[in-house]
Amino acid sequence: MHGLIQRGGFGGIFLCVALFVVSACSMQGPDSRFDSSKSTEKKKQSESRTARQQPPLGEKDPVRIDYLTALTDIVNPQIYVYKEKRRLYVIQSNVMVRDYPIGLGFRPVGDKESEGDGRTPEGDFLICRKDPVGRFSKALVLNYPDKKHAERALFAGILSTPEFKDILMAAELKAMPPWSAKLGGQLYIHPGGAYKDWTQGSIALYNSDMDELYKIASTGTQVHIRP
């Protein structure tokens, strides 16, 4: 062997080094070339889990949570309703200050299209009045139907042009729109219980939660209803 290395000179040494490198590479395992991609995938999965843990508001900035905020300190909030989660969130300056369970219309999936369909409308609304409603001592009236729903109904032939103009005028004035027998109306946030979906399309809270929300919300408070 000694004589073979001598005769081979540097070529023999090169061969030994090459064999060592090949052997070392083979010990890494068949999936080693995918380690980088696996690491990237794990990172993406971790980021996805973190995102799911954030409050589901879809805003650019993360939302902090402070349920101990006093009612008197909640002065200019926005309301977010997530139908699938059956939750109503009160947000002020990117801080979630209240979180209430809710009940929806008796057929909650999908946007409201007509009177009696049992759906809670989706979109961006505002509170146009604070009134007692029927058997409820407190109610926040939403400005439904709004421009978006009126436009869709006009193109579908459900609304007449004069009805459409009346709804647009109310939207510009941020006033209570005329309630259409075809599109439906009289949409509220009201008490009565969040134990199931039982309303005609309104958003129902437990009585104690409604007492709080009625103090928090004002005429003009924005209400964002998401699927």
Image (spheres, helix red, strand yellow):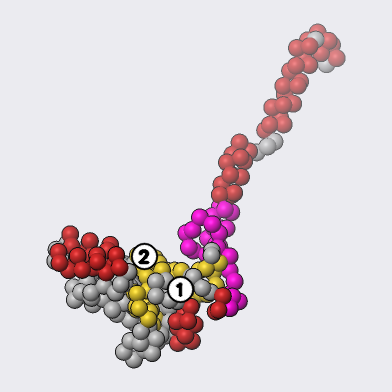
CA neighbours of label 2 inside 10 A, class few (<14), some (14 to 19), many (20+): some
Which residue lies under the disc numbered 2? Answer: 124
Q: Residue at x 22, y 61 (%)?
A: 151
State which quarter of the image contains the N terminus: top right
Which quadrant holds residue 205? bottom left
Observer-nearest residue: 224 or 85? 224
Please tell me in which quadrant of the rendered image residue 107 appears.
bottom left
**Residue displayed at 56% across by 75% down:** 73
Give the x, y percent position of residue 33.
61, 36
Q: Which amino acid does label 2 sit on?
A: Asp
Amino acid under label 1? Leu
Q: Is residue 59 above or below residue 9?
A: below
Q: Which mark is drawn over residue 88? A: 1
Quarter holding the C terminus?
A: bottom left
Contact, CB < 8 Å: mark 1 with mark 2? no
Residue ID at (28%, 62%) = 148
Q: Give the range drawn in magenta.
A: 45-70
Question: Mark 1, residues whose alpha carbon is within 10 Å: few (<14), some, or many (≥20)?
Answer: many
* Residue 46 coordinates in the image, percent (x, y): 59, 54
Describe the element under mark 1 as helix, strand or loop.
strand
Spot occupied by residue 18 in the image (x, y as percentages of width and height): 72, 21
Looking at the image, the residue that sits furthest to the right is 2
Q: What element carries label 2?
A: strand
